[in-house]
Amino acid sequence: MAGDAPLLEVRDLACHFFTLDGVVRAVDGVSLSLARGETLGIVGESGCGKSVTALSILRLIQKGAGRIVGGSVRFEGRELTTLSDEEIKELRGHRISMIFQEPMTSLNPVLTVGVQIAENVVRHTGAGWREAMDRAVEMLRLVRVPDPERRVHDYPHQLSGGMRQRVMIAIALSCDPQLLIADEPTTALDVTIQAQILELMVELKEKTGTAIMMITHDLGVVAETCQRVMVMYAGRKVEEAPVGELFANPLHPYTRGLMRARPRLDEDAEGSGRRPRLQEIPGIVPALNRPIAGCAFAPRCALATDRCRAERPELEERPGGHLVACFEAGKGVP
Amino acid sequence: MFAYVIGRLLATIPVMAVVAVFVFFLLRIAPGDPAAIIAGDDATTQDIENIRAKLGLDRPMLEQFALWCWRLMQGDLGISIFSNLPVTQLIAQRLEPTLALTISTLLVAVVLAVPMGVLAAWKARSLADRVVMGFAVMGFAVPVFLAGYILIYVFSIKLGWLPVQGYRPIAQGLWPFVEGLILPSIALGTTYCALIARITRASMLEVLSQDYIRTAESKGLATPRVLLLHALKNSAVPIVTVIGIGIALLISGVVITETVFNIPGLGRLTVDAVLKRDYPIVQGLILVFAAGKVLVNLMIDISYAFLDPRIRY
Amino acid sequence: MPSSIPASGTEAPAAEAPPQGPWTFARRNPTIVIGGLLMLVLVGIALAAPWIAGDPLKLAPVNRLRPPSERFWFGTDQFGRDVYARTVHGARVSLVVGFSVAIAASLIGLAIGLLCGFYRTVDAIAMRIMDGIMAIPSILLAIALITLTRPGLWVVIAAIVIPEIPRIVRLTRSVVLSLRAQPFIEAAIAGGTRTPRLLLRHILPNTLAPLIVQSTYIAASAILTEAGLSFLGVGVPPEIPSWGNIIAQGRSFFLIAPWSILIPGVFLAVMVLGVNMLGDGLRDRLDPRLARRM
C-alpha cells in the first residue's frame, strides 16, 4: 500500500437510530481507512451496520430517525461530518459516488436514463445539457450498454435488471469520482449477470483508478474483487485483513463461522460420498436497542469466556496486516 | 399513445349512454305518480294530465325512449314545465357564472394545496407539517355554507373589503369579476384544497421514501430539483386523480355556494327548479353535469399518459 | 435456533418492543381517541336532548332575535325559538341520518359487491349501473330523487344512500376479485366448499376492515349532504330541526343575528370532524394498506 495519506479515514463512527422502541446503535464505534485506488470489502450479515456505515459517509442517514452521534470521517483530509449541506452535496456524485442494491427501484421511473446520467454531469461540472447528454452516451458505452445512442432516451422500465445496474454505475462514474461506494451491487441480480457486473466493475476500476468500498454479505464477491476485507458484526468491526490472509487464516470465531457456513460443492464428509451438512452459527443477532456488555458475539460463540461476556474486546494487530477484536482469536477448530 | 387517447375517448361513450338511460328510468321508476307530485297537493286532474303530457309520460314506453334518445342526440334537453322555455336555453344562460366559479375555485385550490402538500411532506413531522395536516383534517369537515357565512361575516360585513354577494360578469370589468369570485372560491375550495393537500402530502411522502430519491440525493442534486422534478413528477398521478375525483365535490358544493352568495348560475337554477318541482330542468342539469364530470375524467385519464411513461410504452 | 447463514436483504436495525398500556395506545393513536371522544360527547348530547334542552319548536315571538345570554345560551331565532334547543335536537337528525346512511349503504353495497364478485352476469349489469350512478354528482341525484317523491326524513335518507352505494360495491367487488385469485380460495373451491360457506368464512372477514373504514367516511359525507339539502330547502321537512334547516331559516337575519347560522354550523363541522377522525384512526389500525395512500 502506498505511503501517502489515506483517501478515506473513518474513526470511531457511531450512528444511532432514535425509534419508538429505544435507541438503536446501528454503528457502534467503527474505524476504517481506504487508500487511493484500493478496494476494501465490508462483509457481514443483514443488520450488522455495513450499509449504515456507508450511508453515513455521505451523510445520507440524516433523513429518517438516524443520526451520526460521534466519530470522524475524513475524506482527502477534509472532515465530512461537520460540512454544511451545500458542501456535502458538492462532494456527492462528484468526488464520492454510491451505487445501491436494487437497480429496479433505484432509478427514477419517469425520467430517461440519459437525463439521470446527464443531470449529474450538469450539476457538478457546469457543462451544458447537450454536452452532458453526449457524456451520458459515452458513459453508457463505457459500461457496455449496447446501442447507447438509442438507449440514452429509454426509460428505466424498458431495461433489464443488469442493464439498470450498468446505468447506475454509469451515473456513479460520470464525474470521475475518487471513491465509489457499492452497497450490495449484485445481490439483487441473477448469478450470471452478477459475474458480468463484477467483472465490469473490476475493469473500470483498473481504467479509472477509483477506490471502491464494496459492501456485501457474499464472501465470493469479496474474494473476486477486494484487496482488503473487514468483517462487521452488530455494528462493530470484528476483523480486518488483506483478502488472501483472511481466507487463509480467519481468526475471529464469527468470521470462521461465516467461512464454514458457505455451501461447498467439493467437500466430502470423511469420504462417505455425501456432502456434509451446512454448518450454521447458532443463535440470532442481538437486539441493537439495548447496550451490549462485552463482546457482541459472545452469546453465540462456542469459545466465549466470562471475560468475553464482561469486557468489550478491542482490535489487536496480528501478523500479516491482520486486525481482530477477540480475546480467543485463533483458538479452536478453524 | 394515440391509441391510448382514442381508447379513453371511446370509453366515455358507454358511460354517457348508461347515464342517459339511467336518467330516463329515474323518472319512471320513482314510487308514486311523478306527475301528481309535481302538480302539487291542490292540483286538479286536468293539471296533472297536463303535466303528464309535458313529461311525455302519456305515450308508450318504447316511444318515450326513442323520442328521448332522438332529442338527446340533437341536444334538445326538453322544455321546462313552468316557464315553457327550452331547458338548453335556460342552462346556457346560467352557464357562465358557474363555469367561472368552478374554474377559479379549481385554480385557487390547486395552487394553494400542492405547494402545501409538498412542503408538509418535505418537512415531515415538523411544525409546518402539523399545521398543514391540521388544516387538511379540519378543512375537510367544514361545510361550504359555514365557510361561506364566516367569510362573509369577516370580510364583507366587519371589514367591508369584499362584496357580500352577487356575480359580476367579466364583460363588466376584470377586477369586479375577480372581486366577486374571491369569497365564493375560498368557501367552495376549502374542502377541495384540504383534500388535495392531504393526498399531495401522502403521495409525496411515499415517493420520498423510495430508493430513487435516495439515488438522487446521493448525486448531490439541489433540493428543489429533487422535490419538484424527481419527487413531484412521480406523485403526480395520485394528485391528478384526486383533482378529478374532487370535481364531484366541487359540483355538489357549487349548488350551495351559489345559494349562499346569490350567484345566478346553474346551482341556483337547480334549487329553483327543485323547489318548483320543474323536473325537466333538473333532468337536463343532471345530464349536463354528468357530461362535465365525464369530460373532466377523460382529461385526467389522458394526462396520465403524459405524466407516467410506463403508461405510454 | 438456526440461521445465520449470511442472508441478503435490506438492513434493518434490530430492536425489541416495550410493553404497551392504555396511555401508550392513546399516544400512538391520537386520531381514534380524539375522534372517539368527540363522537361520544355528541352522541351523548343527542341522546340526552329531551332532558338537557328545552322545546325546539316552542314559538315565543316576544323573545325574537335575542343574542346569546344566560337564559338563551345560543340566543333565539326570528320566531323566538331557542337556538340551543334547536341545535341540540338537530344533532339527533344528523346522527340518525349519518348512521342510517352508512349502515344501509354498506349492507346494500356489500351484498351487491359480493354478488358481482361471484356471478359474471350480475357483475356486468350491476357495474354498468354503478358507473351511471357514479357519473352523476351525488347531490344532484339526491335532489332529483327528492323532487320525485313526497318530502320526509326517510326519503332524504334513501336519496343520500343511493349515490353512496357504488363506492361500497366497487370496494367489496375488488376485495372479492383479488381474494378469488388467491391460491387458498382456489384450494377451498377445489375441495368442494360451497359458495355460501366460502363467502362467510373466507371472503366476508376480509371485506370487513375496509368496509368499516369506508362507512365512517360515508357517514361523514351523509351528514354534510343532509345538512346541505336541508339548507337548500329540499331536505328534512322544516318542522324537524336539522342543522341545515336552522341555518337556512337564519339566512335572512344573518346580518343582525349571526349566531343562529354560525353556531349550528360549528356543531356540524365538529361532528363531521369527529367522524372523519374516527374513520382515519380506524383505518390506521384496521387497514394500514389504505393508510399509505392517504
Image (cartoon, grey):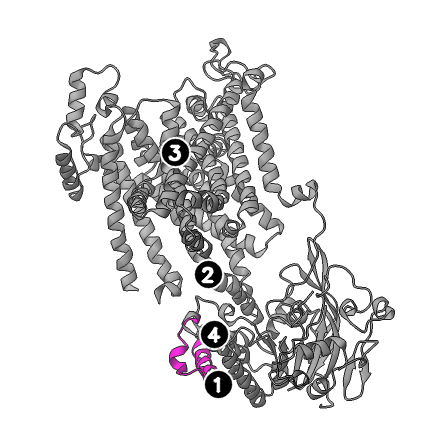
| Amino acid on which disc 2 is placed | Asn
* Rendered image: mark on residue A161: 4
- Label 4 or label 1, whichever lies nearer to me, is 4
Q: Residue B261, percent across and down?
A: 39, 32
Q: Residue B241, percent across and down?
A: 40, 52
Identify the chain of the residue marked 3, using the numbered disc in the image: C
Marks 4 and 2, how far apart at CA: 21 Å
Between residues B17 and C16, which one lies in front from this camera angle? C16
Residue with the mark numbered 2: B234
Between residues C175 and B160, which one lies in front from this camera angle? C175
Q: Residue C30, percent across and down?
A: 62, 42
Q: Main secondary structure of the magenta part?
A: helix
- Residue ranking furthest to the front: A272
* Rendered image: mark on residue A142: 1
Question: What residue sits 15% from the left and 33% below the top?
Answer: B61
Magenta segment boundaries in residue numbering? A128-156
Residue with the mark numbered 3: C161
